Image (tube, rainbow, N blue to C red):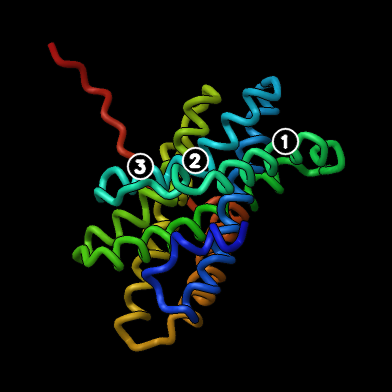
Amino acid sequence: MFDSLALVFQPLASKQFNLLLVVYLVAITAEAMSGALAAGRRNMDFFGVAVIAFVTALGGGTIRDVVLGNFPIGWTQHPEYVYLVILAGLATTVLAKFMHHLKGIFLMLDALGLVAFSLIGCNVALQLDYPVVVIIMAGMLTGICGGVLRDVLCNQVPVIFCRELYASVSLFVCALFLVLRSSGIDTDLNTVVCFIAGFGFRMLALRFSWKLPTFSYQQRWD
């Protein structure tokens, strides 16, 4: 399985590949579990749990690859991805009853996936030689779209539209990664620093309820 997973990172240097593989596995597992928990909160059956887990874990990367024209899409060539995320989602249905603080675990898993996918999206766009703004957008698409699809399918307002610092965290991670990279920081160290900083930022934003300002326009057009 790991040999097959490694193929998606062949364009990367071998030293960087090892760390990105770990990040990728953490990301799809965490997002699949967060999707399963969201499905459980909507009382879905096991098929629904599997679908939401799959969409949450692999939806963002699929949208990114379609936008960037990066074909074939990874999971279509490596069914191991599908097996892993569905297994993680179904395993969550068993483990959930032992989780006494589902909301906190849900948010932590979602934060892990957000940061990890943002870093992976940046690296994919870098390997395709896209300009900086596209690299950042690719990272954000990968980071947030799986969660958006999850929330929409679960009939919830997506987190990124609820004033929380969610997409902003993805933007921060992508920008920090590129800044450190341009400064000559070792890629492995860069990835670790961005992962810790992004996860910490998201957790602090949740802990202290940091929010973006909102725009409210109520004037009627007569």
Relative vertical location of residue 16 with respect to residue 159 in this rendering, above or below? below
Gap in angstroms between the C-alphas marked 2 and 1: 18 Å
Q: Position of residue 93 (x, y in %)?
A: 77, 34
Front residue (pair 38, 7): 7
Q: Position of residue 208 (x, y in %)?
A: 59, 55
Front residue (pair 13, 120): 13
User: What residue appears at the point 63 percent right and 50 percent down from the top-left corner?
Assistant: 29
Viewport quadrant of the N terminus: bottom right
Task: Write down the quadrant of residue 121 in the picture.
Answer: bottom left
Gap in angstroms between the C-alphas marked 1 and 3: 24 Å
Disc 2 marks which residue? 147
Element type where label 2 sits in the image: helix
Q: As shown in the figure, which amino acid type bears the numbered disc 2? A: Gly
Q: As shown in the figure, which amino acid type bears the numbered disc 3? A: Ile
Q: Position of residue 78 (x, y in %)?
A: 50, 48
Residue extending furthest toward the right: 98
Task: Write down the quadrant of residue 47 in the picture.
Answer: top right
Gap in angstroms between the C-alphas marked 2 and 3: 12 Å
Give the number of the disc on residue 90: 1
Mark toward the start of the polypeptide (1 vs 3):
3
Give the number of the disc on residue 63: 3
Residue extending furthest toward the left: 222
Q: How many marks?
A: 3
User: What residue appears at the point 43 percent right and 80 percent down from the top-left corner?
Assistant: 187
